[in-house]
Amino acid sequence: MPQFMTKTELLENKYPIDKYYHEQMNIDEIGQIETELEFYERSHSVTSTILKMHENEFISQIQQEQLTIQHNIHILFIAHAPSLETCTRKLCGGKFRPFQLANVIRNVDYLTMTVIEKTDNNCDKWIFRRNSFYGDEF
């Protein structure tokens, strides 16, 4: 398992982080060895938790009249190539495909970016707005 910088180390090195941030999953909870299906499930769970947390915060700000419904939330995830697939597959209506994951990630270009957008505030359906860093603009 890689060594990660602590919050203190990040702050000492002038990284602008939220020092009150609490990770969604502790490093000890991540198995040293997990199957592709377990990786999909973990990625989807963490992604869904983060999205729900920000959605609840957004709703609270609307109720407090700090924001209006016309505002948008933008959440940036930075991760390795497999996470483009594992974090978005189920959100966009697809099924996990653990037996194809190795082939899928081989086709992910270096520095690829994916943009997804929630289609309706009353549902959990997401669509791809941009599939690749080099692809179509939204």
Image (cartoon, helix red, strand yellow):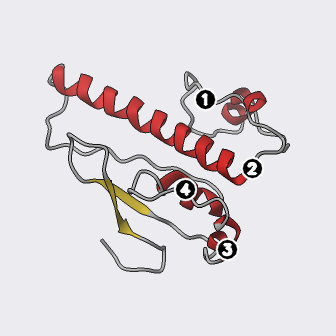
Q: Amino acid at mark 4?
A: Phe
Q: Are marks 2 and 1 in contact (CB under 8 Å)?
A: no
Q: Secondary structure at mark 4?
A: loop
What residue would you read off at disc 1?
23
Q: Are marks 2 and 4 in contact (CB under 8 Å)?
A: no
The residue indicated by pointer 4 is 96
Specify few, some or many for label 2: CA neighbours under 10 Å numbering under 14, 14-19, or 20 or more: few
Left or right of 66? Residue 82 is right
Q: Position of residue 82 (x, y in %)?
A: 64, 60
- Looking at the rendering, which quadrant does residue 97 occupy? bottom right
The answer to which image quadrant residue 57 occupies is top left
Distance CA(mark 2)–CA(mark 4):
12 Å
| Pointer 3 residue | 103
Q: Is residue 50 left or right of residue 130?
A: right
Mark 2 or mark 1, whichever is nearer to me = 2
Q: Residue at x 67, y 64 (%)?
A: 99
| Left or right for 59, reference 53 | left
Residue 8 vs 101, above or below: the answer is: above
| Disc 2 secondary structure class | loop
1 or 4: tag closer to the N-terminus? 1
- Circle 1 SS class: loop
Instruction: Identify the mark nearer the N-term, 2 or 4.
Output: 2
Residue that mark 2 sits on:
35
- Give neighbour class at mark 1: few <14, some 14-19, many 20+ (Cα, 10 Å): few
Could you say where residue 112 lies in the image, as x and y percent from the top left? 55, 70
- Sequence-wise first label, 4 or 3: 4
- Between 15 and 131, the one lying in front of the other is 131
The tag earlier along the polypeptide, 3 or 1, is: 1
Q: Position of residue 129 (x, y in %)?
A: 33, 66
Measure how far apart labels 2 and 3 are at the Cα level. Answer: 15 Å
